[in-house]
Structure formats: C-alpha cells, structure tokens
Image: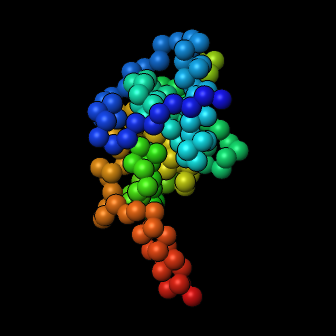
Amino acid sequence: MATRNIRQIGDSVLNKPCKEVKEVNDRIRDLISDMFDTMYEAEGVGLAAPQVGILKRIFVVDVTGEEPYLFINPEILETDGEQTGYEGCLSVEGKSGLVTRPNHVKVRAYDINMNEFTMEAEGFLARAILHENDHLNGVLYVEKVEGPLLTNEELAKLLEEQEQSKE
Ligand code: NI
C-alpha cells in the first residue's frame, strides 16, 4: 500500500487541464494503485490524478467502499435530470457545499487494459463521476457551490435540524 499527498485548493495543479493517457505502463499502473490507496485511506469516494499532482485524465470512484471504478480518458456522453446535494472534496479538506448536478450520466472510458467501456450511473454515483471528471478539466466543486461552504460541524448541525423539522 502506498499513498500520495493530496494537493489542496490553492495549489495551481488543481486548476490545469489534464492530458490523455496514451498507454498504461508501469508508472500509470503504480499511479492508479496509489490513487485507490490514497482515496481509501482518506475515506473519500473519489480521487482524480491531479489531486495527487499528476495531470493525466484518470480518476477512481468508490461510493460504497465495495465498488471500485477506474476511468481512463473518460468522456461524458449524456447527462439527464437534476440533483441537488451536499458535496465535498479531498482537496478542500473539512468543507462541503450544496451543488446541483445532473442525476444521470452516461460515460465512456478505458479500463486498466485500455479496453473501452460505457457505463451509466444515477444519483450519488453520477454525482461522484461528474465531480471527478471536472477535476480533469481543472474545475473544483467550489466554483459550482450554491450558498456558503460549510464546515463539517456546520453541515452536521444543518442536517440534524433538517431531520428534526421532518418529525
Ligand atoms: Ni474532488
């Protein structure tokens, strides 16, 4: 297991567009393996290569802890619907904010053997895929936030209040 440092907002590497992967060599395989290790150790649900300082079009996602997905050179083919929810990012530590995104996504990408695949996702998985895909274009979710960025404490309090108001 090898983890890498997660770059934080303000680091210019997070605002640059990433380059296509031409071939999966040992370096790329090591990067992907380290990205999964880094994501799981940080208890995140997704991580894009620029977040560990590498400007390549690669991201990993696992929203349940048991369904790891790898996307190389992803391309968003279709989006549909709308969802609004709180979102965070391992590069914006301890904060979250309300972001509206499509509820459904169809994405084409390459796997570790550079075989093309197409996948459709909804809800939180779609949100994670779109969030990570933004990273490859140098975009952080804070650019899309509606309202203030909340600390974890503020978010917990807000969700608790919302829960109580339902009773
Ligand atoms: Ni992120």
Image label count? 0
Query: Where residue 2 appears, x then y in whole percent?
Result: 60, 28
Residue 78 visible at all: no
State left or right for residue 3 relative to residue 153.
right
Quarter location, residue 1: top right
Q: How is the image coloured?
A: rainbow
Query: Where residue 9 appears, x then y in whole percent?
Result: 33, 43
117 versus 119 height, above or below: above
Please name whichever residue, 127 or 37, is drawn nearer the observer in this view of the structure: 37
Residue 17 visible at all: yes
Quarter location, residue 52: top left
The residue lying at 33 percent from left, 57 percent from top is 145
22 versus 122 height, above or below: above
Outermost residue on the right side: it is: 66
Query: Where residue 38 appears, x then y in whole percent?
Result: 56, 36
The residue lying at 41 percent from left, 28 percent from top is 53
Query: Where residue 11 appears, x then y in whole percent?
Result: 31, 36
Q: Quadrant of the C terminus?
A: bottom right
122 versus 70 height, above or below: below
State left or right for residue 158 relative to residue 45.
left
State left or right for residue 39 relative to residue 92.
right
The residue lying at 70 percent from left, 44 percent from top is 66
